Amino acid sequence: MQRPLVAIVKGERSTETVRKAIRLIGGLYEFSDRPVLLKVNFITDKRWDTGATTDPIVVEAIIQELKPINPRIYVVESDATLTNADEAAKKTGIMDVCRTAKVPFINLRRERERVSLQVEPYEAVSTITLPKIVLESRVISLAKLKTHTETKVTLGLKNMFGLLPDKLKFKYHLKNIEKVVVDIASVKRPALTLIDGFVAMEGRGPVSGKPVKMDLIIAGKDVVATDATAAGVMGFDPREIFHIRRAAEKGLGRIDDVEVVGESIESVARPFERR
């Protein structure tokens, strides 16, 4: 079995740093066959430099790299319990990128065509309902490098939680959010995970932690391997992160025998403050 490839690129905040990471993992040539959804992280409407939300530079770079291959690109997020995704897109600067690039922004909560999928075997929820467009598209998870008070880290797997079209997502936290994250990965995994670590967050993430300037982009096509690598950069053993470990146990990706290119984990690692 081929080893999953994960790129770690250290560099200034620029589109070129992001594009270098994409090229190191083989580019996006296989993304030509269907629409592509760029799933950003809008748990809040704070700017990227707080470490809370996806950097517009990252979105711009992905669009630049992808558009010559496939112009069917959409930037997506859904409302959160306390956040309106449309307003967050404006306040974070993502909407400006969308307008300039002529790429639509879609609030998934407004998508009425939905499909319910059975999760077998499930961890917390037996049925996951997703917008039809999510299932018909390739998803690129544009996550942040952040700690999380409930899940320890929030990276590529956790970012997919925002695909759920419900606004009142807190109900899933009551079912054990980490198990729900694994259930989502069982029915839909990202085709590419790109973790924005230009400015990361430590401490009381995903909203109230402290920004950490890391100047990093971490990218891979195996979301479990990518998250495991990013967790290592943050000073975590990925096996102590339930949703990463459990996803690996269920064959949704790999923790072990990952080929890391660009920088090594050790050369960029920094122990992140936990809550």
Image (spheres, rainbow, N blue to C red):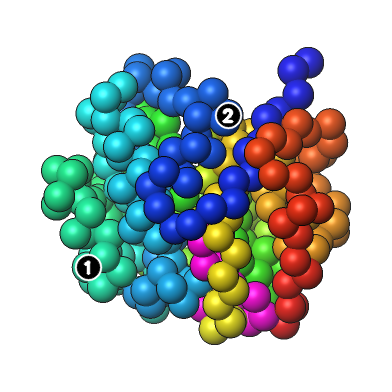
Image location of residue 8, percent across then percent down: 64, 44
Amino acid on which disc 1 is placed: Lys
Q: Is residue 60 magenta?
A: no
Q: Nearer the viewer, residue 208 or 251?
A: 208
Residue at (77, 53) in percent of width and height: 267
Residue at (84, 36) in percent of width and height: 256
Quarter of the image with the C terminus in it: bottom right
* Residue 204 position by quadrant: bottom right
Q: Is residue 201 magenta?
A: yes
Label 2 secondary element: loop
Image location of residue 128, percent across then percent down: 51, 46
Say the numbered circle drawn on residue 244: none
Disc 1 and disc 2 in contact, CB within 8 angstroms? no
The magenta-colored residue range is 197-207
Q: Nearer the viewer, residue 249 or 95?
A: 95
* Residue 179 position by quadrant: bottom right
The residue tagged 1 is: 90
Amino acid on which disc 2 is placed: Ile
